[in-house]
Amino acid sequence: MKDSQYALKNAFIYTILIALILLAPLYIYTVYMKSIYEVQNELLLKQRSTLILSAMEEFDETREDAFEYPRFKSIESGLYDLHFEPIFSLITKPIAKFSPGYHIYDDHAYLIVSLPAQRYFDAEYMIIANSLSYASLYQRVSIILLSIVILVFTLSFVFLDLFSQPFKRVNEKLDNFIKDSMHEINTPLSIINVNIDLYNQKYDSSKYLQRIKAATKTLSNIYNDMDYLIKNKKLDFIPEAIDLKAFMAERISYFDEVAAMKNIVIVSDLDDDMNIFFNTTQLQRIIDNNLSNAIKYSYEESSIEVALKRDESGIRLMFTDHGVGIADSDKIFERYYREETGKGGFGIGLNIVRSIMDEAGIGLEVISQLKKGSTFIYTFPRSISINKHFKL
């Protein structure tokens, strides 16, 4: 994963955690502000009720023909009798019968004031009402939360990216070291193989040299895995027409000497007309890792069966060994996982195979029994059949 992607992912996670932590205090703040708003609204209604009472107190029936009832913007009021029947009311919404005091009902606030008996137009109660809206409060809380989230995310991303720089430089140096080491390893391996072949052409074959060559092939397979692991994100693996039978036969021949070190025989059953459109490097990684693992985990003086068949689902490539078997067929594809550490290797081969399979849409079935052996069945889909792209 790139450093910027790592910083972005972790900044996002950190921001989510901070937002969740802030929900509790923001909730308390919202409840507190709502209560303050309601108190302020109650005071407002009381002020309006005082103005109405003052206006009624000042009304003199002997000098004025009619009482002009006070009206307020966004506030409704009215006078009611003992049974809460309106004597005069500007309140349009039906009112439930409340006791005197401040009440909130159905997003509306009501202040019910008891009046002296038969003093103000025979009214027993005065009701002052207005609608309650917390929209501005919720908007303010949302802006606060959004601002905090943006600030935390920005600072987290910046600081995580800054903190990752030393590790990035270390990783770059480590990558360069591995690349240089891989190059230095490949050169002597090639020299050893070439000189063994030249020696065998001039002199009789030696079992000791054959063991050396088998060991170098094992090292070459590890080298190829490491090389693929380093370069696979930087290279475009272009597919090409491949005669799968011929390719398989060549790789089996390559591993014959490695298998011979344990007196293992590789038996192949490869059908003709097995042509696919695939990348040779990726195909070699699939085949080489399966053959290498089959040899590594097979019992001595056993056999490995390799079959190449076609059925309705596509081309099926099968590797069967007679060895220790697999305890957990899911974990074997995890990077660096090894069921038996004494067998050597780095635990990256099948992880590479899995990544190639997922990218190409290759199916896999693993059948295994402990102490009896394992079968890996790869199904290449019809979509990569050569006949859909070229005619050979």
Image (tube, rainbow, N blue to C red):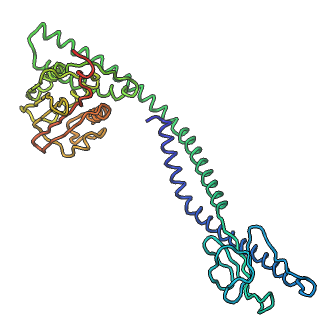
Q: Quadrant of the C terminus?
A: top left
Q: Quadrant of the N terminus?
A: top left
Nearer to me, 112 or 336: 112
User: Residue at 47% across / 39% down in the picture?
Assistant: 6
Nearer to me, 373 or 110: 110
**Where is residue 114, by image quadrant?**
bottom right
Q: Position of residue 357 (x, y in %)?
A: 28, 33
Q: Position of residue 66 (x, y in %)?
A: 86, 81
Is any atom of residue 71 visible in this view? yes
Q: Position of residue 82 (x, y in %)?
A: 69, 90
Q: Is residue 139 above or below residue 275?
A: below
Nearer to me, 196 or 296: 296
Q: Is residue 277 above or below residue 326?
A: above
Is any atom of residue 212 visible in this view? no
Position of 301 compared to 92: left or right? left
Extreme residue in the bottom direction: 117
**Where is residue 141, by image quadrant?**
bottom right
Q: Is residue 363 above or below residue 269?
A: below
User: Residue at 42% across / 30% down in the picture?
Assistant: 174
Nearer to me, 195 or 234: 234
**Where is residue 259, by image quadrant?**
top left
User: Residue at 27% across / 23% down in the picture?
Assistant: 278
